[in-house]
Image (cartoon, grey):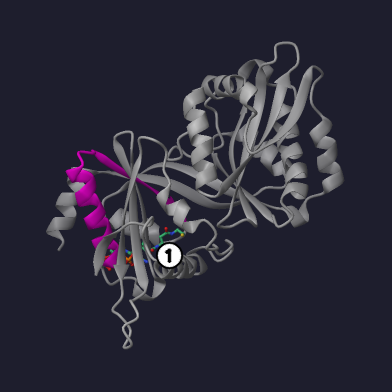
Amino acid sequence: MVREWDPRTASSAEIASLLDTLNAVLAADLPQDPPWRANSLREYLSEVMPGERRISWVAEGGPAADGTPGPMLGHVNVLLLGGMGVLEVLVHPELRRTGLGRELVRVAARRVWDEGFQSIGVEVVGDTPAVAFYEALGFTKEYVETRSVLDLGAVEWPALAEMATEVGAGYHVEFCPGGPPDDLIEAYARAKAEVRDVDDGELRPSSYDPQRLRESLDTLHRRGMKPYIVLALHEQTGEVAGLTEVVVPAQHPTRADQYDTIVVRDHRGYGIDRAIKARMLLELRSAEPELAEVQTWNAQANEAMLKVNAELGYRPDRDWCEYSVDVAELVHRLDNQR
Ligand SMILES: CC(C)(COP(=O)(O)OP(=O)(O)OC[C@H]1O[C@@H](n2cnc3c(N)ncnc32)[C@H](O)[C@@H]1OP(=O)(O)O)[C@@H](O)C(=O)NCCC(=O)NCCS
């Protein structure tokens, strides 16, 4: 049975059951990824940026003989933002190829259509059943990135410490756990606005103005995702010349996510990219003793960034694709397939 579901008011048993399904999916599709924990999972599923909305549904199995509610065997949520819906779907591996995934997408797509949105986007992990699934539903591939993973156990720390110091004269590198300090928010937002040559996927919107940036940091904190930032400050002007952002999620604190890395155009060629990323890893090593890996996503055309990541020890892992579809077409197709 598919029903609308609100993670804010869901019982702890439902959240725990959804976590079991998510971990069964990870074990089947991405066995190298760490399993998720219950920490802040409710908040992860509930909290959104101001102006955004997430609507969720679950597919629940039948109750047990003693009346215990059935398990959460499938889940779909759609994040409504900027004219599009961003979809996430999960079906327990034991229930796959029974049409449940298609039904979950149908229900969500119908709502996106009713809300007046035109398109749906989704992140699809290469070499998983999701590729054939979304292609069967008429989604088309828009963009491919490569996910790379750095194993901290394999890092040569003395070499990394050296890299962290190799930055041109006139720059000061600073570690900012929790986010940029308030007096640097404006300079930070300017750096992000000037350069959009980022490490990140298009379905994860970046924040380019100070207010939006504050809201984005607040949302991260509320979702249990701890941000860390390393800045390169240009001493002469006080401007932010470069920045790199890593988030350690409470849901999988052994594997952090590398978000944006930006070096402002005028400040390229001084070793800032490599130095700030190396400094970040050194800082994380002491700030997050549980951390074992860092993952990052890069456009395949971004050769400079890929080269730096390779020097730091990142190894390419999988394709990470963005697919999209016109909502009207999808709703029509799925209604006809019922
Ligand atoms: C993608 C996913 C939702 C599909 O769910 P599902 O319930 O198995 O999908 P359906 O049974 O509705 O399949 C619909 C159609 O998609 C296509 N399809 C789905 N899985 C497929 C596969 N493994 N191979 C080929 N085609 C596939 C088929 O055309 C299928 O129709 P058919 O069974 O009549 O031939 C499910 O595999 C899943 O949860 N994957 C994990 C999603 C994810 O986010 N992964 C990232 C890691 S967390």
| Magenta highlight on residue 15 | no
Residue at 59 percent of width and 24 percent of height: 185
Residue 330 in view: no
Residue 17 in view: yes
Q: Quadrant location of residue 338?
A: bottom left
| Magenta highlight on residue 104 | yes
Mark 1 neighbour class, 10 Å CA radius: few under 14, some 14 to 19, many 20 or more? some
Q: Quadrant of the N terminus?
A: bottom left
Residue segment shown in magenta: 100-126
Q: How many marks?
A: 1
Residue at 55 percent of width and 28 percent of height: 197
Say left or right for 23 vs 112.
Answer: right
- Residue 182 % position (x, y): 62, 26
- Give the farthest residue toward the top: 236
Say left or right for 76 vs 199.
Answer: left
Say left or right for 237 vs 25.
Answer: right
Residue at 75 percent of width and 11 percent of height: 236
Q: Which residue is nearer to you in this view: 125 or 56?
A: 56
